[in-house]
Image (tube, rainbow, N blue to C red):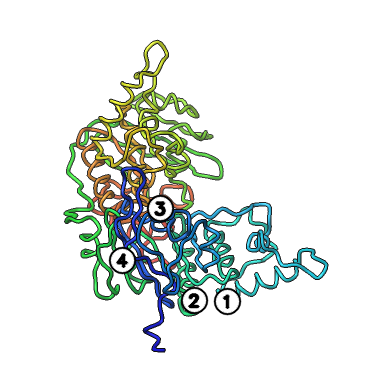
Amino acid sequence: MDPTEVPPPLALVDVTKSFGSVRALRGLSLELRSGEIHALVGENGAGKSTLVKTIAGVHRPDGGQVLVDGEPTAFSAPADAQNAGIAVIYQEPTLFPDLSVAENIFVGRQPRTRLRTIDRRRMRHETAEVFTRLGVQMDPDRPARGLSIADQQLVEIAKALTRQARVLVMDEPTAALSGVESERLFTVARTLRETGAALLFISHRFDEVFSLCDRITVVRDGAFVSCDPVSEVDVDTVVRRMVGREVSSLYPKEEAEHGETVLQVQGLTREGVFADVSFSVRAGEIVALAGLVGAGRSEVIRAVFGVDRYDAGSVRVRGRDLAGGRPGAAMAAGIALVPEDRRQQGLVMESSIERNATATRRRALSRLGLLRSAAERAFAEHWGERLNLRFGRLDDPVSTLSGGNQQKVVLAKWLSTEPRVLFVDEPTRGIDVGTKAEVHRLLSTLAGRGLAIVMVSSELPEVLGMADRVLVMHEGRITAELDRAEADEESVMYAATGQRPGEAA
């Protein structure tokens, strides 16, 4: 048989899926070929997560077909998909922390000796063998507790290979990884491609997509838009197809008049975390804290807000001292914090959209100690319209929203307090390019209205595109303060790595 006539290991044909009145997938088709890395891109809410769960056997499609090796297949549970050779590698895997790496890989299907006891020697041997195939060094006896996210993902990949998986889905795998960890994952992905596996790679990072993938499929509003070889499209084309419109400016920074100093941080120190951190922020100014992962940026703003205590230094808001270690005092002084991890720290995922959006305004929306549901609903509707929130019903769990819309709920929760100072930690992490532009436009508008903004971001283009000043941190200290006109990628990276131009790394 001509190899080109061999059916792909997995294909979706005109798949539809609805949740109540919400149509998540609208006749979507996708073909994954052996020996290929296939990118899937689209805005948050475009249907990518529903598609992944359909492939994984979590959701059953309402219409269309799932084909495995060209044959129509119905997955009634995730185990069916696994048995068909399909594995999903999530950005934050869930391992059993008290089991070893080998035990996690073979959990529920441990090999047995002739005496029907667990064959631990064989488990260790097969684990070491699969890591060797992947070009990765990892001790099979190492406990899973304490493994980095990157290492946990590699354990999941090894688990998939021991199950003879032929199709691997990588859902935003690099969202929580450093540059070095991402490169190691890409090396593993290329190795899998060379061995004939079919990979589906989902990412908002176009540099990764264009350097790693062979073909790219764009989806919008649950429907197929296009599929092309990566070599035949560019970023602008992909973005236009994703959002269905021109994104005129990803960083719509407007000039804003800077007023009085609103926030002053002097000599802030937390032993072993950061030291002698001093900076100020004026009304209408966006100040970015830049630096590499682990530089102490998030820890500084958590300390200023009172989530974490500090050992020395002072914080003043509009000329008044702010007591440390008391988030309530920070809120009363007009400080708001949009945290880095919106799912764990910013939202109650099982609670409704409206309950999350109004979490900071309960007292104002209550009468005689009872929360008024009509007032809560009206308040949530107001902020939903203001931030262009896309949702089904306000009483739906916030977990049903896309990542970008979840971020808007967190922003609504804090902006409704009418703060003087807004801390935003990684404001656009894990959200699509269209929503990024919306968030950036919102931040620019807020600064124009006199809000003082401190933004922590690991994306250099975002830092350079949105900040009036850039404070660069390295190993817990501020190593550079750069005005907008003098900040560029080179100067920021020199400071972030503790180097000066001309010095050897």
Q: Which residue is mark 2?
A: 191
Q: Amino acid at mark 2?
A: Thr
Q: Amino acid at mark 4?
A: Thr
Marking on residue 133:
1
Q: Amino acid at mark 1?
A: Arg
Marking on residue 217:
4
First in sequence: mark 2 or mark 3?
A: 2
Q: Amino acid at mark 3?
A: Gly
Q: Is residue 432 left or right of residue 115?
A: left
Counting from the top left corner in percent of width and height, residue 299 is at: 47, 42
Q: Which residue is mark 3?
A: 291
- Compare residues 309 and 314 and report the one nearer the observer: 309
Q: Are marks 4 and 2 in contact (CB under 8 Å)?
A: no
Q: CA distance from mark 4 to mark 1?
A: 29 Å
Q: CA distance from mark 2 to mark 3?
A: 31 Å
Note whether 125 is above or below 375 in the view shown.
Answer: below
- SS category of the residue bearing label 4: strand
Q: CA distance from mark 1 to mark 3?
A: 35 Å
